Amino acid sequence: MPIFREKAEAIFSRAAFAGDLGIRFRDAGPGWCESVLEIKPKHLQQDGYVHAGVQATIADHTAGGGAGTLAAEGDLVLTVEFKINFLRPALGERLLCRASVLRQGKTLQVAESEVYAERDGIRKMVAKAMVTLALVPAASR
């Protein structure tokens, strides 16, 4: 399974915005990806919870990593749509995200991402996203 991991790691290594936020690749396999974010004050909104934009970014980017594990060599995966539900306020030391591809088509993939906040060793799901990603063949660019 190293090729799947390498594909997802490459997506994370080239993503400056996700890297600036502190989102890090954790693991991947065929059709799935995991990431982690150590929560810092810059990630919080005005009431002390992890900002919705941070949660949306980790959910979206991790879905891209999962979709990327199934893409052909040189192809891109680009988000075309996503919906996210925030289930509870996100508090804790870190966010963990796991994304899985639910449907792989020729031009589109549909993935789901689950975002967990970890606090004092206890994980609680704080958000769930559905992400639609387009496959952009290398030959068309």
Image: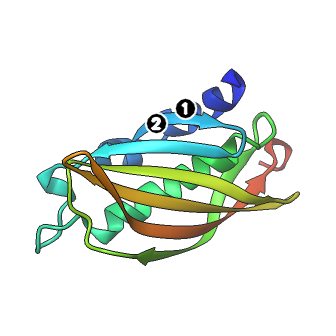
Name the residue tied to disc 1.
9
- The image shows residue 58, relative to residue 68, as above or below, that is below
Q: Mark 2 or mark 1, which has the lower sequence index?
A: 1
- The percent position of residue 137, horizontal first and vertical second, equals 81, 48
Residue drawn at the location 34% of the way across and 67% of the way down: 53
* Disc 2 and disc 1 in contact, CB within 8 angstroms: yes
Residue 87 appears in the picture as rendered? yes
* Viewport quadrant of the N terminus: top right
- The image shows residue 99, relative to residue 5, as above or below, that is below
On the picture, is 130 further left or further right than 85?
A: right
Residue 17's tag is none
Residue drawn at the location 75% of the way across and 36% of the way down: 74
Specify the farthest residue to the right. 106
Residue 23 appears in the picture as rendered? no
- The percent position of residue 23, horizontal first and vertical second, equals 37, 44
Residue drawn at the location 57% of the way across and 32% of the way down: 10
On the picture, is 36 further left or further right than 5?
A: left
Determine the secondary structure under disc 2: strand
- The percent position of residue 97, horizontal first and vertical second, equals 45, 51
Specify the farthest residue to the top. 2
How would you rate the neighbour count of disc 2 (Cα within 10 Å): few for under 14, some for 14-19, many for 20 or more?
many
On the picture, is 45 further left or further right than 74?
A: left
- Tell me which amino acid carries mark 1: Glu
- Tell me which amino acid carries mark 2: Phe
Name the residue tied to disc 2.
25
